[in-house]
Amino acid sequence: IAGITQAPTSQILAAGRRMTLRCTQDMRHNAMYWYRQDLGLGLRLIHYSNTAGTTGKGEVPDGYSVSRANTDDFPLTLASAVPSQTSVYFCASSDSGKKGGDTLKFGQGTRLTVV
Amino acid sequence: QKEVEQNSGPLSVPEGAIASLNCTYSDRGSQSFFWYRQYSGKSPELIMFIYSNGDKEDGRFTAQLNKASQYVSLLIRDSQPSDSATYLCAVIPSGSARQLTFGSGTQLTVLP
């Protein structure tokens, strides 16, 4: 089934540790995104990539980095986790070159708790 | 001021009624508008998108866009308990390189 797979689905992480959240899509979508979702704040964009080899900063990029070595994978790295990064993280993709292609397809989410 | 504003609710309607969800946005140049539904503990899923002023209907759902007043709404006719979820409004602001900005969502409960 075509879609987006995130791993892990949940994680408890000690503050100061490094962590990479994985995201893989098999739809050949050109654009990929990382959002975090916190109660009362909705979905906020962390980083995005419009095409393989390029990335950009979203609304809340500090403390996070991304890479886009190929079309399918878009990992998100927390270099040194802090408790304020406790959140639910969603990876998404879109086929932005098509008419109506701005619509996002989301992964199942990663629930991260930093203690 | 947030770019996309929604009433957080909760909004409760009886089964069979029309649920009306509203969203306002601050960037007058925004061109694309979306409604997503998110069940508790799940990821958001697209309900509808709308680009032009007026109404767009899809089954029990109607999206309404008024660019002059900078609001977009979602009507759910014949509401069902299975419609109980959080509804997220999203827009693509001008100059945003096509990234969606989301509102904080409205929680809807349809009472049997």
Image (cartoon, rainbow, N blue to C red):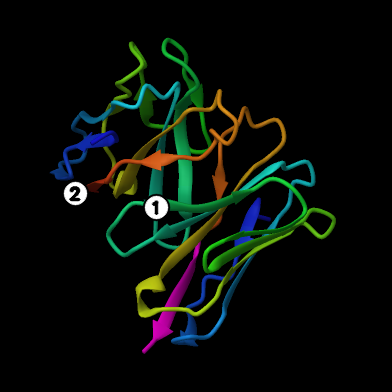
The kind of secondary structure the magenta stretch mainly shows is strand
Residue bearing mark 1: B44
Subunit of mark 1? Answer: B
**Point 40% across, 40% down: residue:** A105
Q: Is residue B83 among the parts visible in the rendering? A: yes
**Point 15% across, 41% down: residue:** A14
Residue B72 in percent (x, y) is at 68, 60
Residue bearing mark 2: A115
Q: Is residue B47 magenta?
A: no
Can you tell which quarter of the image residue B40 is in?
bottom left
- Residue B23 drawn above or below residue A27: below
Q: Is residue B110 magenta?
A: yes
Q: Is residue A61 among the parts visible in the rendering? A: no
Can you tell which quarter of the image residue B82 is in?
bottom left
Q: Secondary structure at mark 1?
A: loop
Residue B46 in percent (x, y) is at 46, 50
Subunit of mark 2? Answer: A
**Point 68% across, 56% down: residue:** B1
Per the rendered image, the range of residues in magenta is B105-112
- Mark 2 belongs to which amino acid? Val
Q: Mark 2 and mark 1: span between their CA atoms?
A: 27 Å
Q: Quadrant of the N terminus of chain A?
A: top left
Q: Secondary structure at mark 2?
A: loop
Same-subunit check for callouts 2 and 1: no
Residue B20 in percent (x, y) is at 60, 75
- Residue B16 drawn above or below residue A26: below
Task: Give the side of residue A114 with respect to residue A42, left or right.
Answer: left
**Point 75% across, 46% down: residue:** B27
Q: Which sits in the foreground, B79 or A37?
A: B79
Q: Residues within 10 Å of mark 1 (few under 14, many from 20)?
A: many
